[in-house]
Amino acid sequence: MDVLTREQRRHNMSRIRGRDTKPELLLRRGLHASGLRFRLHARELPGRPDLVFPKYRAVVLVHGCFWHGHDCALFKLPATRANFWAGKIAGNRQRDERAAAGLTAAGWRVLTVWECSLKGPARLPLEKVISMCEVFVRGSEREGTLRGRTRTES
Ligand SMILES: [Zn+2]
């Protein structure tokens, strides 16, 4: 007999997958704690930006380094079906460019946060990423990028 309700099971599965500790979620929590309010995955905006701050006319895009083909240690083209993956990632990058251009044209300020700033060997302290995001959102820069440390910065 099945003693778990569907709801409980879903909860357990989400715990098992570690969803609660995902860096992106920690970033969202930190921004919320700093008093910023945002919407998630706004469908009506180009590229469905991850975080939308209507009050500041700003969006934050959290890009996975593999899927968006980042030039960093987290990206490595798989050895098998390399052409397939290269084509797929090139398509993603084109979509990213179109989305960013569409957002900018509509007057949104766009901050891209690369996954490598949040996880992996080059990651920055979480508090630093949160505060850099906050500065961007509350500021007036048209666009910005946040990435993990590069070697020269040590
Ligand atoms: Zn990266």
Image (tube, rainbow, N blue to C red):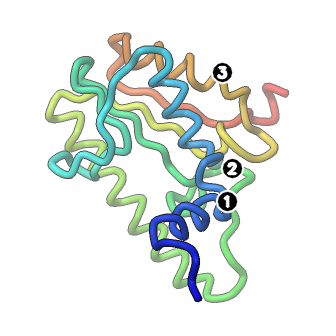
Q: Secondary structure at mark 2?
A: loop
The residue lying toward the viewer, choosing from 2 and 27, is 2
Q: Quadrant of the N terminus?
A: bottom right
Which quadrant of the figure has residue 77? bottom right
Q: Earlier in the sequence, mark 2 or mark 3?
A: 2
Which residue is under mark 3?
127
The residue lying at 14 percent from left, 34 percent from top is 106
Q: Is residue 32 left or right of residue 129?
A: left
Q: Is mark 1 within 8 Å of ligand 1?
A: yes
Task: In the rendered structure, find residue 75 and report the number of the disc placed on it.
Answer: 1
Q: Is mark 2 within 8 Å of ligand 1?
A: yes
Picture layout, residue 125 above or below residue 74: above
Q: CA distance from mark 2 to mark 1?
A: 6 Å
Q: Position of residue 68 (x, y in %)?
A: 50, 58
Nearer the observer, disc 3 or disc 1? 3
Q: Position of residue 9 (x, y in %)?
A: 55, 70
Which residue is under mark 2?
72
Q: Are the residues at dot 2 and dot 1 in contact (C-beta closer than 8 Å)? A: yes
The residue lying at 41 percent from left, 64 percent from top is 92
Q: CA distance from mark 3 to mark 1?
A: 24 Å
Q: Are the residues at dot 2 and dot 3 in contact (C-beta closer than 8 Å)? A: no
Tell me the kind of residue under disc 3.
Glu
